[in-house]
Image: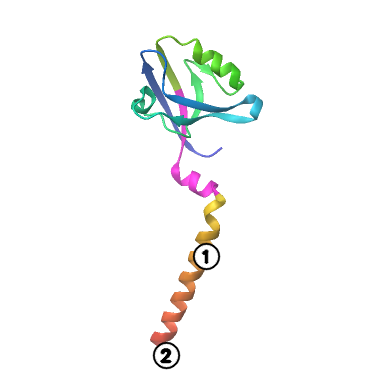
Amino acid sequence: MGTGDFICISMSGGAPWGFRLQGGKEQQQPLQVAKIRSQSKASGSGLCEGDEVVSINGNPCADLTYPEVIKLMESITDSLQMLVKRLDALFLFLEDQSHLPSLQHLLGYTSLLTATLANQLMG
């Protein structure tokens, strides 16, 4: 896991909270915010898609299965406090390898263009 900040998120008024989770112990994936509904309690709270959920109302989530998380969420009647970990944007960019082919192509093109201009100026 990369570096990031821990953020406390608070919501009140009961469900619906306006977000969807994914992951869990049985999937061997961290519990993360998958989707946030616009104009919801979650969107107004500062919660972001991709946030990793560390705890819900003081209950650590690392060892919970997705069904256990759903059961926990359904038991919350009024106030929701979540501790989340938000990864640095630079780390996410560097961790995602999908952009590398186009970046390598761009760098190669830039090097070729620089060499061509240098030859024209010197020649």
Q: Which residues are magenta?
A: 83-96
Mark 2 is on which residue type?
Answer: Gly
Q: What is the secondary structure assignment of the residue under circle 2?
A: loop
* Residue sitting at the far bottom: 123
Sequence-wise, the earlier of marks 1 and 2 is 1
Q: Quadrant of residue 81?
A: top left
- Distance, label 1 to label 2, CA atoms, is 27 Å
Which element type, helix, strand or loop, lies under badge 1? helix
Residue at 44%, 85% (x, y): give it: 119
Residue 105 is marked as: 1
Q: For label 1, count other residues whose C-alpha is less than 10 Å away and answer few (under 14), some (14-19) or many (20+).
A: few
Quadrant including the C terminus: bottom left
Q: Is residue 101 above or below residue 58?
A: below
| Three-letter code for the amino acid on which mark 1 is drawn | His
Identify residue for label 2. Answer: 123
The x and y percentages for residue 94 are: 51, 49
Which residue is nearer to you in this view: 95 or 2?
A: 95
Count of marks overlaid on the render: 2
Quadrant for the N terminus in the image: top right
x and y, in percent, of residue 82 in the image: 45, 21
Image coords of residue 105 (percent x, y): 52, 65
The front one of 92 and 38 is 38
- Which of these two is toward me, 116 or 73? 73
Give the side of residue 30 with respect to residue 83, left or right. Answer: right
The label nearer to you, 1 versus 2, is 1
